[in-house]
Amino acid sequence: MIPSIPHSRLFRTTYASYIVLFFLFLAAPLIVVGTFAFNDSLFPSLPWKGATLDWFFGSEQPKLGLFQDDPILKSILVSFFIASCTTVLSLLLATCNAFLFEREQFPGKNLLYILMLMPLVIPGVILGVSILVFSSSIANWFEMNFGWELDFLYPSTTLVILGQFAFISTICTLIVSARLRKFDLSLEEAALNLGATKWGAIWTITLPFLKPALIGAGIVSFLMSFENFNTTLMLVGSDAPLTIAMFDRLREGATPVLNAISLMLMVASSILAIISLLMDKKSPTT
Amino acid sequence: MSLRTPKLRLGLLLLLTPMLLWLLLLIILPHVNMAIISLSERVSAGEYAFSLSNYAEFFTESLYWNTFLRTATMSILVTFLTLIIAFPVSYYIAKMLRGRTKGLVFALCLIPFWVSELVRTYGWMILLRETGVVSSSLQWLGLTDGPIEFLYNDAAIIVGLVYTSMLFMVVPLTTTLDSLDDSYIEAGYDLGGNGFTVMREVVIPHAMPGIVSGCIVVFMLTLGNYLTPALLGGKDSLWFTEQIFTQFITRFNWEQGSAFGILLLFLSSFIVWLGLKLSRQSFTRVMS
């Protein structure tokens, strides 16, 4: 509240209730998803038939719990694998890009920077299909000319990783660059004066400075990859990651086991979100 | 520091290579390739010729361009609604709250968006379906006699899309509003302005970069969304990304699908360009 500007009581109450309503709107779907994970019914809907933990631990059909549901557990592993690979690749590229755009001067830098931002404005579905078409063309070309069968270039886990890497690395680049911009170059120069090599200075001074941003970017990229749907849908092979497996179940007709998975996802994301917010406090990035 | 030594140029090359490989192989070439494929037509097995037939098909088949226009207008509507809902919230966080509460409320706004879009959409399905929470509550309150289906219509799609987009509007708006010095607003009142004129002459012009960047990102994400229209709109959601998916995955007609993809890309670039022109903002500033 700006103290010098008077507002009527009515205005303040109305405004505050609007904000409360807004937060109800934000929270409603999440609360509902979480609550129905404990409903002792075959459908995630009212009436409430009492609380149960069967949707987590139940061991027989039709109430097969999340921890007994092998296809779902397997898809979680696939998602973990994809998210880990995407995160490592994105962080490596993002660090290179940050040094490139913050430290180097070269002709065409501005154009390259704009191109680097492009993945943010390409819809995920389009990014997915364009990579699908391109990699299939390459694979076909190799098969026609050399008789090589490059299976990983057809829809597969590798393609999913590449597709997610394509846009997640832009987001990581923005986070890491923002931190590198705040770095005081004289610290690195001091290390050089004290006899460190260029690499030694970067390794012992600059990279530790970037660490909070790297951890933050890593968390963001892991979550974005784990939760990505649009790009993944176009590139997925025989091993469905969690979002695709859940989507297929949803289309068949949802059971509260999906709520149980969702609740676990929410808990995991909130923990990561809190870690990342704490990181953000240490290194204010925009 | 001795710049421009050969050693440093090698460093530049080392930094440039991964960036260029990524950009060329994953972004530029796939899209160029898609543009080329969209301009070709299958003559016989393995034979392709230049043709505009895929684009002609789009303009002659009314289902296709109707879906296209529908997706565009609904995306604009969603962007507008998101802005209208988010602006008071951002203003409240930036100008009405102070210190710790401000940080906390802002963080509360962000947390739902760490949860997968699939989960959020699923939540709306549980709320809106015929046997869902909203319908049951209305019956319990005695407002309706029988169950009502709120799902599988345009309103459900719009609610879901606005919800999903909210974060991308609240964050840039709050950041720009937060950077507006309170004394400017006070000065506006001192000079005889009322709430409305101060908002129009001081606050909104200052918040313009945030408004534009929020609108662009929300519009883009809405236009390219597949999940929310597919789940909340059901079979008749008629979202353009679904046409693309159908052409590629179901019908295996990659030439037609590529043409649709290029058209969607043009539409989104055009609207983004128009937004930047109308508000006189630069792309790099808005995006970062």
Image (cartoon, helix red, strand yellow):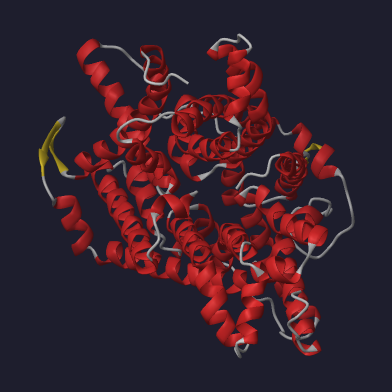
Residue A75 position within the rendered picture, expressed as x and y whole percent measured from the top left: 63, 32
Which quadrant would residue B142 be assigned to in this image?
A: bottom right
Q: How many marks?
A: 0
- Nearer to me, B197 or B253: B197
Left or right, B11 with reference to B60: right
What residue lies at 53% left-to-right and 74% top-to-bottom?
A: B204
What residue lies at 39% left-to-right and 39% top-to-bottom?
A: A113
A243 shown above or below A121: above
- Nearer to me, A167 or A110: A110
- Nearer to me, A40 or A134: A134
Which quadrant would residue B62 be assigned to in this image?
A: bottom left
Q: Is residue B132 visible?
A: no
Residue A17 position within the rendered picture, expressed as x and y whole percent measured from the top left: 77, 78
Residue A262 position within the rendered picture, expressed as x and y whole percent measured from the top left: 71, 46
Left or right, B267 with reference to A124: left
A211 shown above or below B62: above
What residue lies at 40% left-to-right and 53% top-to-bottom?
A: B283
A99 shown above or below A259: above
- Nearer to me, B244 or B74: B74
A72 shown above or below B276: above
Residue B30 position within the rendered picture, expressed as x and y whole percent measured from the top left: 31, 35
Q: Is residue A210 visible?
A: yes
